[in-house]
Image (cartoon, grey):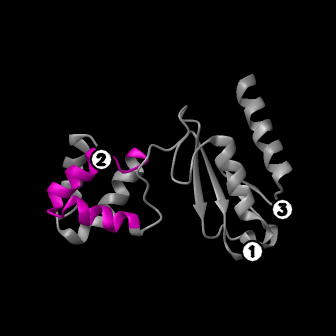
Amino acid sequence: MAKDRLSKLKQEFNGEPADLIPVLQRVQKADGYLSRDAIARVSRWLKVSEHELYGVATFYAQFRFTTPGRHHIKACLGTACHVQGGEQMLDVLQRRLDIKPGETTDDGEYDLERVACLGCCALAPVVTIDEKTYGQMSVLKLQRSLDERENIESAS
């Protein structure tokens, strides 16, 4: 986190521990994630221990601690998706990308997120890649969708 960004935050907030969540949201919006450096700087400024700050940030699913990939993949594991094979979709994604939820591929192309619900239960199981929703997924359809994306990317 850049010093000038912290200076701007100091102008917008009072520097009270109650500012923690909105400050973390702003930092993540700017950086895409909460870096160790950002955690340390916010901790010192708000006079909240890094341990407590991590405790708060890990409680909320909105915060991430790794650099996001160029493409964001979400695997829904809500009730409908779970019953219809959501875990299988997540397993395929983990094996194919060689990452776990919350991680980013080594090349920085993809990050993977496990979500509780994407709000389209009638299409279960559901996976989103960037802003596109893929419903009624099967292992084969998911593999094909990933292959198509890779072919398009390599042709560009």
Q: Which mark is residue 36?
A: 2
**Front residue (pair 14, 52):** 52
- Residue 131 placement, left or right of 36: right
Would residue 46 be counted in the magenta stretch? yes
User: Neighbour class for label 2 at 10 Å: few (<14), some, many (≥20)?
Assistant: few
Identify the secondary structure beneath mark 2: helix
Q: Position of residue 122 (x, y in %)?
A: 80, 72
Figure quadrant of the N terminus: top left
Residue 120 at least partly seen: no
Amino acid on which disc 3 is placed: Gln
Q: Which residues fall within the magenta stretch?
A: 31-58
Asked where in the image residue 136 lies, by quadrant, the reply is bottom right
Q: Report which residue position mark 1 lands on.
A: 80
Residue 59 at least partly seen: yes
Amino acid on which disc 1 is placed: Ala
For the residues labelled 3 and 1, the Cα–Cα distance comes to: 11 Å
For the residues labelled 3 and 2, the Cα–Cα distance comes to: 39 Å
Please name the residue shown 56% across and 51% down the image: 100
Outermost residue toward the top? 155
Please name the residue shown 74% across and 61% down the image: 126
Asked where in the image residue 90 lies, by quadrant, the reply is bottom right
Q: Position of residue 115 (x, y in %)?
A: 60, 64
Would residue 30 be counted in the magenta stretch? no
Q: Report which residue position mark 3 lands on.
A: 136
**Front residue (pair 51, 62):** 51
